[in-house]
Image: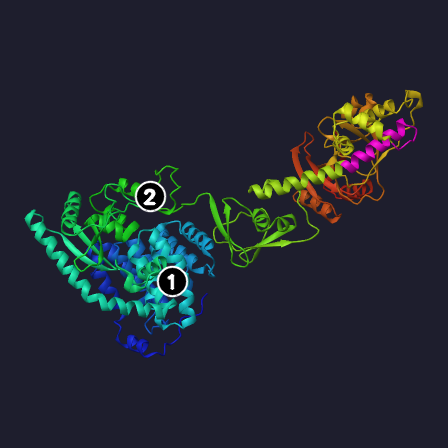
Amino acid sequence: MKAPKRSQASNPAAVARRFFSPSPEKAIRAVCEGRLAAYLSREAIDEIYSAFHFAEQAHRGQVRRTGEHYIHHPIEVADTLAELQMDSRSIIAALLHDVIEDTQASKEDIVELFGEDVALLVDGVSKIGQIQFDSKEQAEAENFRKMLMAMSKDVRVMIIKLADRLHNMRTLEVMEPAKQRRISKQTLEIYAPIAERLGLYHWARELQDLCFRYLYPKRHHAISKAIKQREGNRKLIVEKLKNSIQETLDQSHLDEFSVYGRRKTVFSIYKKMVEKRRSFSELHDIYGFRIIVPKVDDCYRVLGLIHNAYKPIPGRFADYVAIPKANGYQSLHTVVFGPLGDNIEVQIRTLEMDHVAESGVAAHWIYKSGNVDTQTSNDLARQWLLDLLDPAHHAGSPLEFLEHLKTDLYPDEVYVFTPKGDIKKMPRGSTALDFAFAVHTDVGMHCTGARINKSLASLPTVLHNGDRVEIITAKVSWPNTAWLNYAVTAKARTSIRNFLKQQTEEDALKFGKRLLAGATKQRLFGRKRINKSVQNALLKELQLETWSDLLIDVGLGHRLPDMVARQIAQLSDIDNSEGKILGQEALVIRGSEGLLITYSRCCHPIPGDPILGTFTAGHGLVVHTSDCPNITELKKQPERCLMVDWDEKLDKYFPVKLKVKLRHSLGAFAEVATVIAENESNINHVDSQEGSDSLLQIDFVIDVKDRVHLAQIVKAIRHKPSVAKVERKKG
Ligand code: MN
């Protein structure tokens, strides 16, 4: 919740406004019976009145800094939208646009009273309002604009937000200078460009001009003054131009045209001065003229007349009628040498072209209700909007565009914030883990979790537009294979894969060394050192580069240690005929072998069980219980078997299977589960089936430390009266 807007304005203008502004009822009536009545039905207007009453009630007691009742702000916003002839849903949303954020009313209230679509619009506007923006460099501002557009899924959300901002800018004079500058900077960098891209040039120009006034008051003042001094000229030129066109048109039987003399805004003149490094007096084309004609071919006829009367400046003519701009803008542009020696910009267009040029996206609502077929107009509008916002965005079908203009314009991207407020662009579907790697590889390598919008979240959490993400790291944390399941970005995946590969290779190297040492000891009568020349000869024979490569191969189970040992013995001229082989020493399982040892899922060996290691192609060393029926065949190939034993100090949990038969009784299962938990074990998997003996059979896979631990659990389960039978299951 924002601070309540109760601050009483103390400046005289504000006080005056408070006393002289019309009552809210009068204000809304003026809008409804004026602009809205011109294009909306009675029913729609009645609903707008009820939205007003709801908002007025909700904001009651709140006073704007300008001194007026707060409700005047939403009314003004609604009126601005009425100028564009926006649909009634947008007008209602405009009246309600601050109630979620600033009053007791909730989104649910709005859904109930005004429907889901209005609620979505209001909610969208509120969400954009919540985004914090600290001024950043250009590239950042561009991403910010894209994020806002993506967040306002329905383009009307953005149009309402722009109208809101426009009114706030128009009444900015009551704020302190620091706040004026901050808001102006944000508006100039973010909102004015969005208005421009939506084709709302009218708003964009006004926003820019207001911003310029607050950001550079002195320059603004100086330029305005200079413009005023030339104001007399403008009227003169308009008169002359109008007359001379009139004269020519009279001769060519053309009537119904209008000429507007258009002064460029202070801001655009300032921009031109900066760009061209000229002083104001050196600027020639500060006036523009617009001629509105009835029909398309009139455009060219009038152009011919103008060029006849005034000398055109070479290279300044552009035909956007024949070749419209990507955003649908159509007009003829030319610059002529004017009657008073000034360069004069002239735009010639039809009324419809003028609407599109001034109201951009909003013009499509106007023409939607007019004679243009709705479907076509919508498709055009959507395509136009896409082109407008991103020229590269030509793919995709314009089909499912019926209800309103959805601006899911960046379907492949989400924009999220770092804790410092920087923006990161991520592929859609990216998770907190991806974000960690996007911040920095080191952050990714050590991340353990995240805080998203200040609440704790796990690494697989998918990110949404506008999320503020903070990554929690720990020095002792490293990537694991599971991370690959929810890392989307190439950067994260590559980093994780590289790490895992390197990690596995390091483990494999160590493990291979142990395996080979055991095997050579047995074959070579305890001689551990292997001659350099023997090493080289063997590598050549096996077509390997380095000794480490060989050890890694052995560790990964690609080569059998005993076979390699036998080859070494041969190359070293050591007699390793069967009789001379030493008894095998068991390889001790330390629990640090990582992925290199697999514990068979058929017999689930646990510490304390007699075990046997087997080499299976592609699986490395697999450990079974010695009595596992699945290894009877393998036992006949001694080179594929390895004696293994448990390290006494193993501190790990291993899965084991239990078969429990329960007499049917309510809560029996829960009882068993509780016993397991009480004995510091964890249930991995449960399967149940109805036995023929009318007992319920449940298969558990639980984690235990060793046989002692297992025995303790089995005993505790057996103790329960509902348990008929419990036993370990193998194979
Ligand atoms: Mn507002």
**Which portion, as a residue range, is magenta?**
509-529
**Residue 230 placement, left or right of 452:** left
Q: Secondary structure at mark 1?
A: loop
Instruction: Determine whether 178 is above or below 35 in the image.
Output: below
Identify the residue at horizontal 34%, vertical 78% (top origin). 11
Where's residue 76, x and y in %?
29, 64
Crowding at label 2, few (<14), some or many (≥20) Cα neighbours within 10 Å? many
Disc 2 vs disc 1: which is toward the camera?
2
Mark with earlier residue (2, 1)? 1
**Residue 32 placement, left or right of 298:** right
Along the viewing direction, whichever of 14 and 209 lies nearer the viewer: 209
**Residue 349 placement, left or right of 440:** left
Q: Quadrant of ligand 1?
A: bottom left
Ligand 1 lies under 8 Å from the Cβ of mark 1? yes
User: In the picture, residue 278 is in which quadrant?
Assistant: bottom left
Q: Which mark is residue 382?
A: 2
Is 406 colored magenta in this rendering? no
Is 518 colored magenta in this rendering? yes
Q: Which residue is mark 1?
A: 98
Residue 662 visible in image: no
Ligand 1 lies under 8 Å from the Cβ of mark 2? no
Q: How is the image coloured?
A: rainbow
